[in-house]
Amino acid sequence: MNYPIPAREAERIDALKRLEILDSQPEQAFDRITRVAASILGTPIAVVSLVDETRQWFKSRHGLDAAETPREVAFCAHTIMTEDLMVVPDATADPRFADNPLVTDGLNIRFYAGAPLKSREGFNLGTLCAIDMKPREISEEERACLTDLAHLVVDEMELRLAGQIALREIAAREQAQNELEKINQELEGRVFRRTKELAEAKDRAEVANDAKTEFLANMSHELRTPLNAILGLTEMIGSRIYGPIGNDQYENFVDTINGSALHLFNVISDVLDVSAVESGKIKLDEQVVDVGAVINEVEKIEIPHADQYGVTLTVEIEDVLPTLHADRTRVKQIFLNLVNNAVKFSNPGTTVVLAATLDDDKSIVFSVSDKGIGIADKDISKVLETFGQVELATRRAHTGAGLGLPLSKTLVELHGGSLQIRSRLGEGTTVAAVFPAERTRT
C-alpha cells in the first residue's frame, strides 16, 4: 500500500529525532492530552502519533493496545501532508482508506480526525488524532479543541527536550565540579606537604604565614614555566605557523585554552607579587618615567579587554605633564590593575576614563573612573585587603583573586604614595594612585 511522502522528508525526520522522544516511556503529560481529546470528541480512541521512516509510533495511546503500526497503513501518514485538520467521516467511503486493513480488519476504523503536530521549523512530525468505529461528523468546536490540543502536544515535546538538555547540563556541571574538587584536594595535599617541608626546615617558632609566604615566593619558576609553555604553544597554533588547524572547533578550543592559561598566569603573577612584597623581596628599579607613554601603552593593552565587556576607554592627560621618578614596570602594573578592575565592573555601553594630572602640591596622580556597580562605603576597606572581595547582588561573574587593588596599593606605598578610592554604590568608582611631589621631575 502506497503512502504520500512530504517534501524535505529527510529534514523532517531529523527534526523528529532531535526531539529525542521516539520509543520513550509513557508520560502523564501526553496521556492527559489524549484522555481529554477522547472525552471532548466522544471517541473511544485518541493517540499522539509520531511518523518516522517506516512506522507511526504512539507516544500516548488512549483506548488502544498497539504501540505502533506500519507507515503504509497509517492514516496519520496522510495527515502530515496537510496544514490543517484532516477528517475522515467514514473510511469505507474514502478511496484512500476503503481497503486499508485497519478499516477492513482488526480495529474496523470508520471515523478519523487528526491534527498535525507542527514543529518550530515548520515540519509536521505526527498527529494528535481521535478514532471511532462508527461513522460520524465533527463540529467546529471539536475541530478547534483538537487543534489546540495538538499545539499543547508540541509544547510538551519541546518542554520535555528542554528539560532533558537541562538535566544533561546539570549532570555535566556536577561531574566537572566533582573533578575540580578532586583536583583541588590533590593540589591542597601537595601544597600542604610542601609547606610542611619548608616549615620543618625553618625555625619552628616562625609562624605558619611566614612559611606560606616563603613557599609561594619560591614557587615562581615551577608555576610560571609550564604556563608560559602553554601560552606560547597555543599562540603558535592560533597563528598557524605550521599550517592550518584543520577544524574551526579546534581553533575555538585553542583560544579558550590560551585565554584560561593567560588568566591563570595573571592570577599567579599577582599572588607571587603579593608574596614577594610580604617577604620584602620587591626592589624598585627607579628611572625617569614618561607618564603619557605609560598610559598610552596601558590603553592599547586594555582595549581588547574593554571590547569584550562593551566598554569604551578614554584617555585624559594634561598637555604639559612632568616626568615621574619611579619604577616604570610597577607604575604600569598599577595602572593596568586599576583599568582592568574598572572594565570588569563597568556596565556595557559605559566609558572608563584613564587620566593623569599634576596636583596643586606637584604630586602626579593617575586615576581611573568608571560608571560601574560601585562600592559601598563600608566595603572600601575590605577591597583593599589581600584576597578581599565584596559580594554584590548586581555583580556579574567576575573572575580574579581579589589582589589587584591591594597589590596596587602596596606598590604605590612602596613609592611613598597612596591609593585613594571614591565610590557611590550603583553609580561608579574613581581610584587614584597619588605619587608624592618629591618624585615629580620637571
Image (cartoon, rainbow, N blue to C red):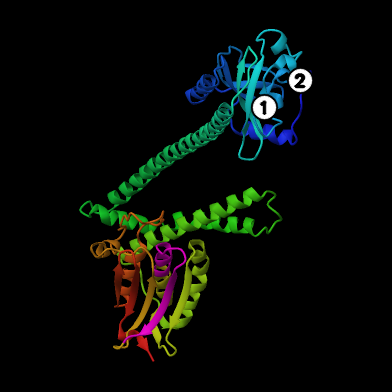
343 vs 74: above or below: below
Left or right, residue 34 beside residue 283: right
Image quadrant containing the N terminus: top right
Q: Which mark is residue 86?
A: 1
* 349, 293: nearer the viewer: 349
Q: Position of residue 77 (x, y in %)?
A: 70, 25
Residue position for label 2: 96
Q: In terms of depth relative to the viewer, which is nearer, 215 or 327?
A: 327
Q: Secondary structure at mark 1?
A: strand
Q: Is residue 347 visible?
A: yes
Q: CA distance from mark 1 to mark 2?
A: 13 Å
Q: Quadrant of the C terminus?
A: bottom left
Give how far across and how far down residue 306 sits, in percent: 49, 66
Q: Secondary structure at mark 2?
A: loop
335 to the left or right of 116: left
Closer to the chain start, of discs 1 and 2, is 1
Taking depth in this image into account, of 88 and 37 the one nearest to the observer is: 88
Amino acid type for the residue under numbered disc 2: Arg
Q: How many marks?
A: 2
Where residue 411 sits in the image (x, y, percent)? 34, 71
- Labelled disc at residue 298: none
Segment colored magenta: 338-359
Residue located 40% across and 75% down the image: 331
Farthest residue toward the top?
Answer: 105
